Image (cartoon, coloured by chain):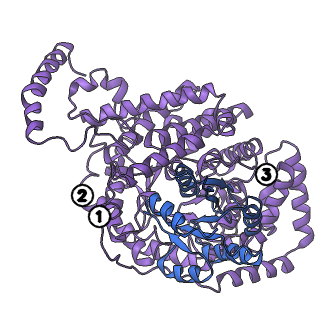
Amino acid sequence: MVKKETIKQMHEKRADWEKQKYSKAIQKNPERKQKFKNLSDIEIKNLYTPEDIADLEYLKDVGFPGQEPFLRGVHPNLYRGRLWTMRQFAGFGSAEETNKRYHYLLEHGETGLSVAFDYPTLYGYDTDHPLARGEFGKCGVAISSLWDMELLFHGIPLDKITTSMTINGPAAIVWAMYIANAENQGVSKEKIGGTIQNDILKEYIAQKSYIFPPEPSMRLIVDTFEYGFNNVPKWNTISISGYHIREAGSTAVQELAFTLGDGIEYVKAAMKRGLSIDDFAPRLSFFFNAHNDFFEEIAKYRAARRIWASEMKKLGAKKQRSLWMRFHTQTAGCSLTAQQPEMNIVRVTMQALAAVLGGTQSLHTNSMDEALALPSEKAVRIALRTQQIIAEESGVTDTVDPLGGSYYIEWLTSKMEEETYKYFDKVERLGGVIPAIEKGFFQREIAESAYRYQKETDENKRIIVGVNRYKLDEEPSIPILKMDEKGEERQIKRLKKLRTERDATKVQNHLQRLRKAAEGDENLMPFILDCIHSYATLGETCDVLREVFGEYKEQAIF
Amino acid sequence: MIKKIRVLVAKPGLDGHDRGAKIVARALRDAGMEVVYTGLHQTAQQIVNTAIQEDVDVVGLSLLSGAHMTLFIDVALLLKEKQMDDVLIVGGGIIPQQDVPGLKKAGIAEVFGPGTPVEDIVSYIKKNVKR
C-alpha cells in the first residue's frame, strides 16, 4: 500500500527508534512479560507500522465492504443500515416456560429468537426415554413432538420473526417441526426465515451431540440444503460453527481453520450430490465465538471473510452472494467465571464489542450467571441491554469496519489467514476432514490447547480477574434461576396423551415410508415432514433413522 | 513401592462437554495417578461397572448439563449398593453452591466448580483417598 522507497525509510527509522527510544524506555520500565502472545500463541510485536502490511494491496486484498474479497464486510453499509440481529440463545424446562422467556425477551427489544434444546432433544430422544433421566429441560427446552413446538412458539408470528435453532444430529426432524408449525399457523414455507445449526462435523470434533455416523449424517445435511433451496428459500440450512470448537478449548486460529475447513467439506459434499454451488452457497452461514483477546477476535472474523470468499471462488462459485461469509457470534461461555460473577458483564461487553467491530450479522451476549446455572431473567436482560448500549450509544456502528487499515489489525488478519492455511494443509495430508476426525486429529489439537490454557492459568501466567488474581475472601452470591419442578411430569403426561390421541396407523405408515426412503437414496425431508405432521415424536422418527443408519461412537482419548 | 492411586474419570448422562474431564484426567495422570477415562454418554450402571472392573480408588464425575442432582447421586447410590463405600467420589462442573450440601449428603465428598486450579483437585484426592 505504501511505496517501496518509503518502506525502506521507515525500516531504517524504526531501527533507530528501537535503538534510541525503545531500548531506553525498557531500561526504565522493563517489559511485564518476556514475550507478548495472544491466545493463539502468536507473538505480538511492540508496534506495527505500514512496513508490516507492505505486501497488502488495498484493492485486491482489502477492498470495499460488499465487494470482493469481502474482508471489510458482506454489506456495503453494514450497521448504518440495519443493526445486527440481537438473538439471545434461550431455552429451559418445558415449552410453556421457554415460550414465556421468548415473549419476555421480545418485549425487551430482542430482534430474533434462538432455541436452546435440552440434551434428550439434541440426541433425538423423547423426554420419557430412559437415557433422558435427569436431563429434562436442564440445559435447554424439551421438544419431543410438534405439539411441544406449537407451545414453544405460541403467540409468536413466524412470518415476522426469524429463529435460530441449535440442533444438529436430529436437525432435519426439528426443522420439519418448525416448518409444520408455521404451516399450521398459516405461514407458508417460503415466508419463514431462520437457521438450523445442522453442523455435524463440529459435533464429532467438539460438541459431541452426534447421533449417526458421518456418511448418513452428511446425506441428511445435503438433503436439507436441497430441500431448503427448493422450498424454504429464506432459511439458512446450516450454521457452520466454530463456537463449540473454541469452547472445547481450541485457540482462535484453530477455531477459524477447523470451521472453514468444515464449511468447505459441506460444499464439496453438496456438489458431489450434483447440487449447483450457487444454488445452496448463499444459504450457508457461520457461527463464531467471541473470546477475551479483543484484537485477535476482530482479526479472526475479518480473516474468515477473506478466506471464505477466496475458497468459494476456487470451488467454482460465480454469484457474489455465494462468497459471503455471514456469521452469528456468541460471547465465550468458557471465559465466564463463577467467581465474582458480576464481572462477567464487563467481559461480555468487550467480547460483544469485538464481534460488532468484526461485522457480525447477529449476536448473543452471555449472562453473568452462566458459569453457575442457566440465566435468570434479570441476568439475561442485562446481557441484552449490553448489546443495545453498544448499538445505540457507543458510536462504533457509524462507519463500516472502523478498524480496517489499522497496521496491527491488518497484519494480524493476514497472519491468522496464513496460520489457517497451514491447518488446511495438515488436514489435507490426513485425507480430509472426516478421516482427520476418525484419526482424532482435531480432538487432540483442541485437548492440547485446552490443557495449555489451563496450565497457564494455574501457573498464573494468564491472569483471570477474580480467579487467580484480585480474589475475594468471600464470594458474593447471586440469585439463580429456579425451574418449575412439575415441568417434566407435565411433559411426560403430554407425550402419553399424544400417543393415545393421534392416528396411530397414519403415524406407523409414515414412519414405515421414512424407513424405506432412508434405505434408498431419496431426499428424506418430505418423508420426515409427513411423520411430523402426523405427530410422530422426535424419538420415534429418530429411532427409524438410528435403525437404518446406525449410531456413531467415539474413541475416548484425553 | 507405593501403590499408585487409581482414578476413574467419568462423564454420566448425555452431556458432551468434555473439556474439563479431559483436563482433569490428564492432570491427574501427570501427577502420577493411574487414570481411566470412560468417554461420553455413560449410564450410572456403566460407570459403576467400570469402577469395579478397574478396581479404582476414586471416581471423578464431570457434568455441565445441570443433571448432577440425579446422575451424580445415582452413581453414589449404586456404588454404595455394590459395597464400594471406600471409593472416594468427587464431582465437578456447572454446579450451583446451593446444590453442594445435597450432593455431599449423598456421598459426593467434594465438588469442584469452574476456576478450580487442577492442583487443588490433585491434592484433595491425595489427602482424602480412602483405600
Residue B92 found in image quarter? bottom right
In the foreground, A258 or A163: A258
Q: Are marks 1 and 2 in contact (CB under 8 Å)?
A: yes
Residue occupied by mark 3: A551
Position in image of residue B75 (x %, y %): 69, 72
Q: Nearer the viewer, mark 2 or mark 3?
A: 3
Q: CA distance from mark 1 to mark 3?
A: 46 Å
Position in image of residue A453 (x %, y %): 43, 49
The answer to whether residue A73 is seen in the rendering is no
Chain B pictured colour:
blue
Could you tell me which residue is drawn at 32 percent across and 67 percent down?
A343
- Relative to residue A487, is residue A22 depicted above or below? above
Q: Secondary structure at mark 3?
A: loop
Q: Amino acid at mark 1?
A: Ile
Label disc, if present, on residue A389 of the rendered structure: 1
The residue sitting at the bottom extreme is: A486
1 or 3: tag closer to the N-terminus: 1
Could you tell me which residue is drawn at 51 percent across and 67 percent down?
B127
Chain ID at mark 2: A
Q: Amino acid at mark 2?
A: Ser
Could you tell me which residue is drawn at 60 percent across and 53 percent down?
A207
Q: Secondary structure at mark 2?
A: loop
Q: Residues within 10 Å of mark 3 (few under 14, many from 20)?
A: some
Residue occupied by mark 2: A394
Q: CA distance from mark 1 to mark 2?
A: 7 Å
Q: Residues within 10 Å of mark 2 (few under 14, many from 20)?
A: few
Position in image of residue A547 (x %, y %): 86, 54
